[in-house]
Image: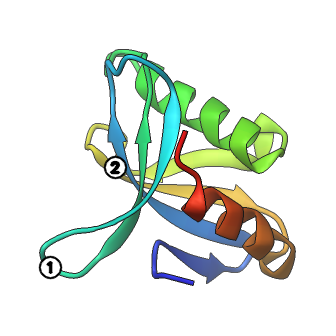
Amino acid sequence: MSGFFRECRDGVELFVRLTPRAAKDAVEGIETTADGRSHLSARVRAVPEKGEANAALEKLLAASLDMPKKSIAVIAGGASRLKTVRVAGTPGDLEPRLARLAGRKD
């Protein structure tokens, strides 16, 4: 699996590049930056004000991973396009879901 996530004590942390004010909410797969870091690319219709885009990202990821929204939280990069999102759960159970998410082109 590409390096767009890392295991942590209570689940995994995803590295996400979020584009707000998009035409639709979508997960677009894995992208690699010029410095070689991988991240999950996502778009949401919400505006980046008062946490609306972050909340929309959490909702999108919860639906895409078929998990409850309370299991997903933006933990870093709240005001940035590059975010770290914690997904609570057992890493071994989450990996197949993440693999499907990584290959998705909505």
Residue for point 34% across, 49% down: 77
Judge by depth and name the residue closer to the eye, 51 or 56. Answer: 56
Relative horizontal placement of residue 4, taking residue 22 as reference (left or right): right
Image quarter (top left, top right, bottom left or bottom right) of the N terminus: bottom right
Which amino acid does the dot numbered 1 rest on?
Asp
Secondary element type, mark 2: loop
- Residue furthest to the front in view is 105
Judge by depth and name the residue closer to the eye, 54 or 16. Answer: 16
Judge by depth and name the residue closer to the eye, 39 or 81. Answer: 39
| CA neighbours of label 1 inside 10 A, class few (<14), some (14 to 19), many (20+) | few
Give the number of callouts: 2
Query: Looking at the picture, how far across and down is residue 100, in whole percent?
Result: 69, 62
Image quarter (top left, top right, bottom left or bottom right) of the C terminus: top right
Residue for point 34% across, 21% down: 22
Disc 1 designates what residue? 35
Question: Measured along the vertical axis of the image, is residue 99 above or below residue 47?
Answer: below
Distance between the alpha carbons at the discs numbered 1 and 2: 18 Å
Query: Looking at the picture, how far across and down is residue 9, in whole percent?
Result: 71, 79
Quadrant of res 46: top left
Secondary element type, mark 1: loop
Residue for point 77% across, 77% down: 91
Disc 2 designates what residue? 77
Query: Looking at the picture, how far across and down is residue 81, in whole percent?
Result: 27, 44
Q: Earlier in the sequence, mark 1 or mark 2?
A: 1
Query: Looking at the picture, how far across and down is residue 71, in whole percent?
Result: 77, 48
Which amino acid does the dot numbered 2 rest on?
Gly
Given this view, does label 1 or label 2 mark the residue nearer the observer? Answer: 1
Residue for point 57% across, 67% down: 13
Relative horizontal placement of residue 7, taking residue 46 as reference (left or right): right
